[in-house]
């Protein structure tokens, strides 16, 4: 049996999960779940989901605790009532691969009962992080163990509202508190919204915090039917998945725990059914922030194309998100020095989705080793705030190679010029991208490339010249500081690419979005790449020019400097509409937010964007209304 001190040390990560016995780990998970269900969590959802439960599944995969519905521990009387319908847990997916497997199961079941894949509809809603309940119109039940729950109808008698002032009897939902209200009124008194939400359903009298929240209609019962939702076909779901997730996660003013997707077709839902714990026709997607506690073997320094020295932690091999992780970035040497990241330290590691693993924090410190010299060129390193930098910009091999690799990666219209090829070219005296484009087959062969490889590389260089590429992408590929793709597009909306190299600092600073310091860095950076740019352009590149802001119409149109979003099927290409809008000084975004001014809709508009626009009081215009108002 764990002591109070042990429980506190495990929760605070003073005792590492790897040091726990199987029985202690199980006891802690059971306790953490009970405390979470009773509104008194001892660890964050993230740590429970991504550190403790995965470790328990690895050690005791068949334990009954992992096979049953996680029961609500409400602290009510022992009397339980059978629910009008089962409220099972929801199976979880943390990667797109897991979502794809769910879709494969759906199509398998649909084939068995001859439902065409094109007829299958999927619905998505935010997964609320509150107290689950079922409202049959007469009584409100807690979820309990999924089969039986407790009667908490008293919450309605106390004045608890239903979202959108809708009627009783809408089935499953959750008792929640508005996130904005919690932050402004309750966060100084309660650690988590769930701590507060528990007070709403207890048998004892309401305290003033609960009464005020109910009176302000900030504490609510939210039937799932009332949530903003997305609905569409499997193909639409696949093509828009990340946009759908972002919209649904940002569409409610409540704490959420991911997004729930389910099949709409009643016949298919009935056929797929459920197992003891989950409905097979439903799945919850949570952004994968899987964690692990890992020992550091050593810390090595790497040089980037900008001269920044990045500490890389070499780790004991660890499984995260289906991959074996051997190393992770330590961000910068200021953190190494501050947190004690060194050989022998223990770190908390996160890998979100399929992204490069990241060190969240150092759990056990060790002696640090701060390099004095650049590992590439041996130059004396200098500190720039928290960053160690190599000042040898023009002669540091790793910086030069990095810049050339970056160019081809951003250009993204040719193959073959990766790390190995660029490294070999550097060894043969190539120092900048413009030199590469001056090569021919004979020269490459003389450098040691094979005949066929040499011809392929030249073909790829020709292809990159001939295929159309946006001018802002071409400019961004040079890697000028503060000139990423977004800033390049902004710059080229105001000046053509031929003119940007002759701009003064003041002219750059006068462009919206560019401060004076940024303008100075861009000015110096453009000066440093001008000769390379001229060599490359003289060799011929098919650049797709950014439309310049039309000063004759920009200031006079009703949408100038407004933020708009296009959605649905338009009578003309949406891409053309977006380009035209940008040329008129209109800010075009992909998703609706509180900062959106107008939502321009065509045919077959998704309900989620419409709901989000209404929630944020965004003005909605049809395509024809927009064009008429544009008046050009």
Image (cartoon, grey):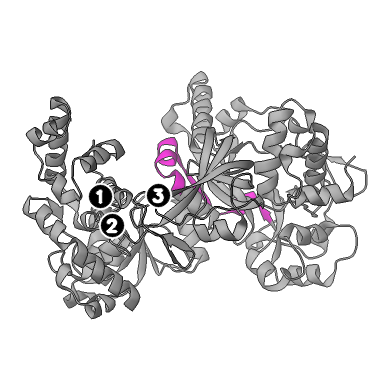
Q: Which residue is mark 2?
A: 479
Which x, y percent locates residue 160?
76, 63
Q: Which residues are magenta?
A: 222-242
Which x, y percent locates residue 300?
48, 46
Residue 517 within the magenta-colored segment of the rendering: no
**Residue at the image position 15 percent from the left and 57 percent from the top:** 532
Q: Secondary structure at mark 1?
A: helix
- Among numbered discs 2 and 1, the one appearing first in the sequence: 1
Determine the image quadrant of residue 467. top left
Report the residue that reaches farthest toward the right.
Answer: 78
User: Is any part of residue 160 visible from this angle?
Assistant: yes
| Mark count | 3
**Residue at the image position 11 percent from the left and 58 percent from the top:** 534
Which x, y percent locates residue 370?
51, 55
Report the residue that reaches farthest toward the top.
Answer: 112
Marks 2,3: beta carbons within 8 A: no
Q: How far apart are the alpha carbons under marks 3 and 1?
A: 23 Å
Q: Secondary structure at mark 3?
A: loop
Marks 2,1: beta carbons within 8 A: yes
Determine the image quadrant of residue 428. top left
Q: How far apart are the alpha carbons under marks 2 and 3?
A: 22 Å
- Among numbered discs 3 and 1, the one appearing first in the sequence: 3
Q: Quadrant of the N terminus?
A: top right
Residue 234 within the magenta-colored segment of the rendering: yes
Q: Residues within 10 Å of mark 2 (few under 14, many from 20)?
A: many
| In this rendering, the label closer to the viewer, 3 or 1 | 3
Marks 3,1: beta carbons within 8 A: no
Q: Which residue is mark 1?
A: 407
Q: Quadrant of the C terminus?
A: bottom left
- Among numbered discs 2 and 3, the one appearing first in the sequence: 3
**Which label number is shown at residue 375?**
3
Q: How far apart are the alpha carbons under marks 2 and 1?
A: 7 Å
């Amino acid at each position: 049996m764990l002591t109070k001190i042990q429980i506190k040390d495990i929760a605070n990560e003073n005792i590492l999960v790897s040091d726990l016995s199987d029985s202690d780990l199980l006891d802690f998970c059971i306790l953490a779940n009970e405390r979470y269900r009773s509104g008194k969590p001892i660890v964050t959802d993230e740590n429970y989901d991504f550190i403790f439960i995965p470790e328990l599944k690895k050690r005791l995969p068949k334990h009954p605790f992992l096979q049953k519905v996680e029961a609500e521990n409400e602290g009510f009387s022992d009397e339980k009532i059978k629910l009008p319908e089962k409220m099972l847990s929801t199976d979880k997916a943390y990667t797109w691969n897991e979502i794809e497997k769910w879709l494969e199961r759906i199509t398998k079941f649909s084939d068995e009962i001859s439902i065409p894949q094109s007829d299958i509809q999927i619905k998505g809603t935010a997964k609320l992080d509150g107290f689950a309940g079922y409202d049959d119109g007469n009584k409100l039940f807690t979820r309990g163990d999924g089969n039986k729950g407790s009667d908490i109808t008293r919450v309605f008698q106390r004045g608890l509202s239903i979202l959108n002032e809708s009627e009783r009897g809408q089935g499953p939902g959750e008792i929640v508190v508005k996130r904005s209200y919690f932050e402004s009124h309750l966060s100084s008194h309660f650690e988590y919204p769930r701590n507060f939400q528990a007070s709403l359903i207890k048998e004892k009298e309401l305290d003033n915090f609960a009464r005020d929240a109910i009176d302000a209609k900030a504490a609510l019962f939210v039937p799932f039917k009332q949530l903003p939702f997305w609905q569409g076909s499997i193909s639409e779901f696949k093509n828009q998945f990340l946009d759908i997730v972002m919209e649904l996660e940002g569409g409610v003013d409540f704490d959420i725990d991911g997004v729930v997707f389910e099949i709409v077709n009643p016949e298919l839902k009935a056929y797929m059914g459920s197992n003891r714990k989950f409905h097979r026709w439903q799945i919850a997607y949570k952004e994968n922030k899987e964690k692990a506690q890992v020992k550091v073997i050593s810390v090595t320094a790497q040089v980037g194309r900008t001269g920044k020295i990045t500490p890389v932690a070499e780790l004991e091999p660890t499984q995260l998100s289906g991959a074996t992780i051997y190393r992770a970035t330590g961000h910068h040497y200021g953190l190494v020095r501050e947190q004690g990241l060194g050989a022998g330290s223990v770190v908390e590691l996160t890998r979100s989705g399929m992204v490069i693993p990241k060190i969240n924090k150092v759990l056990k410190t060790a002696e640090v080793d701060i390099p004095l010299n650049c590992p590439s060129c041996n130059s004396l390193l200098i500190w720039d705030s928290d960053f160690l930098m190599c000042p040898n910009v023009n002669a540091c091999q790793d910086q030069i190679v990095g810049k050339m690799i970056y160019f081809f990666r951003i250009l993204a219209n040719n193959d073959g010029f990766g790390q190995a090829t660029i490294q070999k070219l550097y060894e043969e005296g190539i120092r900048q991208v413009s030199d590469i484009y001056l090569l021919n087959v004979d020269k490459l062969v003389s450098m040691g490339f094979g005949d066929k490889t040499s011809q392929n590389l030249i073909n790829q260089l020709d292809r990159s010249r001939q295929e159309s590429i946006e001018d802002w992408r071409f400019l961004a590929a040079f890697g000028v500081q503060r000139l990423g793709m977004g800033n390049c597009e902004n710059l080229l909306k105001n000046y053509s690419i031929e003119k940007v190299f002759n701009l003064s600092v003041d002219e750059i600073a006068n462009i919206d979005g560019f401060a004076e310091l940024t303008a100075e860095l861009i000015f110096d950076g453009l000066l440093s790449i001008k000769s390379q740019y001229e060599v490359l352009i003289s060799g011929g590149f098919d650049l797709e020019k950014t439309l310049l802001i039309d000063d004759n119409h920009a200031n006079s149109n009703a949408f100038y400097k407004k933020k708009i979003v296009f959605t649905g099927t338009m009578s003309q290409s949406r891409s053309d509409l977006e380009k035209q809008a940008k040329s008129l000084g209109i800010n075009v975004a992909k998703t609706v937010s509180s900062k959106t001014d107008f939502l321009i809709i065509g045919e077959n508009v998704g309900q989620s964007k419409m709901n989000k626009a209404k929630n944020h009081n965004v003005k909605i215009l049809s395509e024809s209304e927009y064009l008429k108002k544009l008046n050009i």
